[in-house]
Image (cartoon, rainbow, N blue to C red):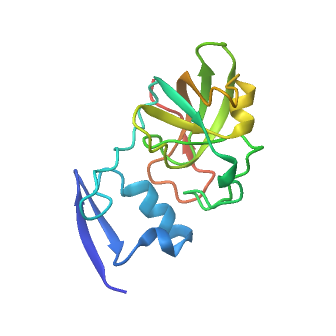
Amino acid sequence: MPLRTVACGQRLLLLASGLAAGLGGPVAAFAAEHAQGATTGAGQAPVAALDRSGRKRVGTASVYSHRFAGKKMADGTRMDPHDDNAASKTLPLGTEAKVTNLKTGKSATVTIQDRGPYVKGRIVDLSPATADKIGITPKEGVAKVEVKPLVVPARAATRPGDREEPQR
């Protein structure tokens, strides 16, 4: 399979021709992790760059629809609405983060396992179980939250357990 070099900010990426995400396994994980900042295709807007700073951010959280239950997430696992998983466009896959509902003060720890949300102004999609824990009702569907990364995966992680503490 031919390889091509793609300029991505200050990074050069080697991507197999075709859609790397459709290949699954390590290639999909590599592409999801490193293609941030590149354009997603002809005429599409650039994807947000990954943030490994460990800085907290405040914004709107939404809840994964139940129709995503059992579907593959960016990290290759299946979405379980009963687990504490979440989606972020800017946090690296595998990041563990504390999500606090600013209205209720309730918080939960999630693992970033997917990309999204793709709605303007939203910073994180939460599983229904996590949303319930922090007091986001199905009727509301969204809430203002603070997302604070607790553990950010190592930049060159070769195994799922390789992690580094965020810089303070």
Residue at image point 46% right, 30% down: 54
Instruction: Specify the quadrant that holds the N terminus.
Output: bottom left
Q: Position of residue 20 (x, y in %)?
A: 43, 71
Residue sitting nearer the eye, 88 or 128: 128
Residue 19 appears left or right of 161: left
Residue sitting nearer the eye, 11 or 19: 19
Residue at image point 74% right, 43% down: 83
Q: Position of residue 93 (x, y in %)?
A: 53, 48
Residue 154 appears left or right of 42: right
Residue sitting nearer the eye, 90 or 157: 90
Residue that extends furthest to the bottom in the rendered view of this protein? 1
Residue at image point 70% right, 48% down: 66
Residue that extends furthest to the front in the rendered view of this protein? 139
Q: Is residue 145 above or below residue 6?
A: above
Q: Position of residue 96 (x, y in %)?
A: 60, 37
Instruction: Specify the quadrant that holds the C terminus.
Output: top left
Q: Position of residue 85 (x, y in %)?
A: 66, 43
Q: Is residue 14 above or below residue 72?
A: below
Residue 18 appears left or right of 68: left
